[in-house]
Every structure is written in structure tokens, then in C-alpha cells.
Image: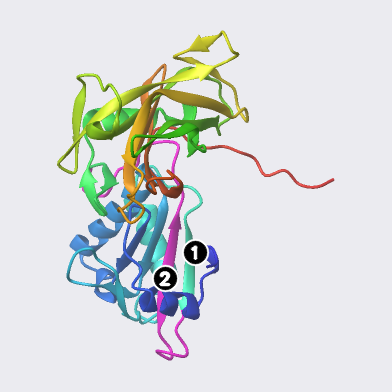
Amino acid sequence: MKLPEDWGEQDLVELISLKQEENLQLDFKRAESLDSTDKKKTEISKDVSAFANSAGGTIVYGISESAQEPRYAETLSPINPAKYPKEWLEQIINSRIQPRIQEVLINPVDLGSSCPGQYAYVVCIPQSTTAHQASDHRYYKRYNFESVAMEDYEVRQTMERASRAAYQIRMARPSRVSDRDGFRFATLSCVVENVSELVGRDVSAVLFLPKHVICGPDNYEVLVEDNVYSRIPGTWVLSTTSFKTAMDLHPVSPCQIFFQREVKFSSSLSSTPPLKAVVKVFDQFGLTLTTVVLLSIPDLEVVSTKEIFSSGVARRSKISAF
């Protein structure tokens, strides 16, 4: 599908036919969300600022979401552009959020085929380099597909984004795969890349997996959706004899980090639901990135990757041909 800023009526209809679920970077709002009351205007400022304070994303005003969880795009909810033109929504966003969010784009989608004379507004919000306050003088973030108030430390972290490096991770193919006694054993690794223009200092990574699949887990335990997970610290392998648990990571320099404990699965689990892994990246400022990775079993192929927390801002510049 096209980028949200290029969506047309057919793209919105497709979201509905696919029953596209809301997520941390996509939200659906019915036409009634646009109203001249102070309460509704405050809700607009709250929702838009929450995206900018988190990872950015898209709000579609003009689609009704389902009543049941998980919420998905259910029907068109057309907006009368004579009553609420694009410029009205733009003015609400610019006047009720402090400081003003740069580069917010509103794509007015003409619903001429489905609802002649009516529109939907696709609001594209970038991740910001600072924290933005809604008109109720509070700061919000996206959490569990909702806009919730930020803690003081989260506001401080968000305000420091411009001075912090940003990272991306991707799981690499498992290494040292072997089959023994009906189980498949493997060592996992991932590639961490600095996608900002700053040097990341003392970068490290930790993999969290269900404790029962880790060979020789330590006593560190966390709950992930009521399942007991344990950690596997990562090691940067610089050569056959040189290892580091943390290192400086320069821009546009992907590096591989290995998680040095084996994981094991029954070799007959081909129909088992994907395994949820959590990778956390740290640098000199503390936690900077959390990514959830779904892995198929027993081959440990990546099914999907979702970034759920990032404290830095990617600043890759577009390079034009010359």
C-alpha cells in the first residue's frame, strides 16, 4: 500500500476490507471526533501530540473503529468539509499543541465514490525531536494503542532525543544450528545499526526469551504477557579472540552482536505459534530501543519485527543522484 500521505479513497476502503487493526502508529477516528467543543479540541491535541512524542504515525479522521478489541477499521465515517475543512483541523493542531509540531501533513481524501461531497483526513505525524504538550497542559504518549499521560522521566527522555543516537535492529539467521536428542539447538544474533548522525557510546544489547527455551538461564526473570522470560546478554565479536559486551557504534556502521547461550526446541514443533523475543538496546544514556521479534519454530526465521520504544531520532539524510 502507498504511504499515508498518498492515500486515496480506495486505500481507505482497502483498510476497511482488510479489517486493519489499530496499532502504535495507526489510529482511526470517526467523524464525531471533529467538533468545536473545547473537549474535542483537547482530544485532538492529545492524540496528535502523543504520536509526535512516541514514534510518529498516522491518524485517520473519517473511519469508525470496531467496538470490540482489538479495534480495527470498520466503516467509513465521512466528514463534511464545509463544516470542518482541512484548514480548521490544521489550525487546531497548530494552536493547541506546544511547541508546534513541525512537518505535520494533512492529506484530505475525497470520498467521491462512496460518499459524494464528503472527506476523510489522513493526518501524518512525524516523531519529534522534543516533547509536545497538549492543550490540557499534559504530555501524552502512545501505549497499548491509546494516548496516555507520560511520566516525568519519559518527558525528560523525549526532550533529549535530539542529543541521543538512534538505533535499529534486525535478527540475523541462527548460527551453530544442530539437532540432538529430538531437539534443535541454535545460537541467536542480531545486527544493530546506528541510524542517527551521532556516535552511540557504550552500546549493548540484551535478548529476552521464555526461560524454558534457554539452555542454562540465569536467575534474572521478567514477566512478558504472563510468561516467565529470562535474559541473554549480547557480545560483540570483534575477532576470533576479541569480545566486548559494550562498544561505541558509529553512524551507518551495522554490527552483529551474538547472544551466547543456546536455545532449544523440539524438532517436531513446526505448527507451533511464533515465539516472541524481546531485544533491548542500551547506550550511555540507558535504555534506548525495545523491539519485539516474532520467530517461527523450529527454524527461527523472522516472522515480524515491531519497534515499541525508541528514545532517539533517526536522521538519515536523503542523498540525491548527481
Residue at the spot 63% in from the left edge and 30% down from the top edge: 252
130 in the magenta segment: yes
- Give the extent of the magenta segment: 110-137
Extreme residue in the left direction: 226
Q: Position of residue 11 (x, y in %)?
A: 48, 75
Image marks 1 and 2: residues in contact by CB distance under 8 Å: no
Residue 192 shown left or right of residue 26 in the figure: right
Whichever of labels 1 and 2 marks the residue nearer the N terminus, that label is 1
The residue that label 2 is drawn on is 121
Q: Is residue 86 above or below residue 220?
A: below
The residue that label 1 is drawn on is 4
Residue at the spot 31% in from the left edge and 48% down from the top edge: 50
Magenta region, mostly helix, strand or loop?
Answer: loop
Residue at the spot 24% in from the left edge and 19% down from the top edge: 218
Q: Position of residue 137 (x, y in %)?
A: 23, 43
Q: Position of residue 17 (x, y in %)?
A: 38, 79
Amino acid marked by disc 1: Pro
